[in-house]
Image (cartoon, rainbow, N blue to C red):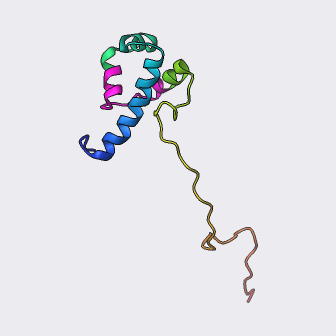
């Protein structure tokens, strides 16, 4: 994916800003957060610039540390439930026995 594309920047910038905001609310420097998570300041900077996203291990640690859901920290997209199908294209009911000509 091209990191200069507008959609990439928009998605990653938003999620990064959420984490920066939470860090600043606690008056933590990037080094403070790195120390709390057991990582480097370079990693924190990459996350906040949006050039890299935290892996699963650090997403869990960030949620625990900030006492917030992953969606609140911009770590995962909020998924909407798919609309229920109102069409009759659904698969046929296979629970009823089929009627066959026995001859």
Residue at point 63% right, 69% down?
86
Is 3 drawn above or below residue 48 in the view shown?
below
Is 97 drawn above or below residue 29 in the view shown?
below
* Residue located farthest toward the bottom when viewing the structure as drawn: 103
Taking depth in this image into account, of 8 and 55 the one nearest to the observer is 8
Q: Position of residue 52 (x, y in %)?
A: 33, 30
Magenta: main secondary structure equals helix
User: What are the residue bounds of the magenta stretch?
Assistant: 44-59
- Specify the quadrant of the image occupied by residue 88: bottom right
Taking depth in this image into account, of 22 and 57 the one nearest to the observer is 22
Q: Position of residue 76 (x, y in %)?
A: 47, 37
Screen quadrant of the C terminus: bottom right
Query: On the picture, is 63 further left or further right than 98?
Result: left
Query: On the picture, is 55 further left or further right than 88?
Result: left
Query: On the picture, is 58 further left or further right than 94?
Result: left
- Specify the quadrant of the image occupied by residue 11: top left
Residue at point 46% right, 34% down?
74
Q: Position of residue 97 (x, y in %)?
A: 75, 74
């Amino acid at each position: 994916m091209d990191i200069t594309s507008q959609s990439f920047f928009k998605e990653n910038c938003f999620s990064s800003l959420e984490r920066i905001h939470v860090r600043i609310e606690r008056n933590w420097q990037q080094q403070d957060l790195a120390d709390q998570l057991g990582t480097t300041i370079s990693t924190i900077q990459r996350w906040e610039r949006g050039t890299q996203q935290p892996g699963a291990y650090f997403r869990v640690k960030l949620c625990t540390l900030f006492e917030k859901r992953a969606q609140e920290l911009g770590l995962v997209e909020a998924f909407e439930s798919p609309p229920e199908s109102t069409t009759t294209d659904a698969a046929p009911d296979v629970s009823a026995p089929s009627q066959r000509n026995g001859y």
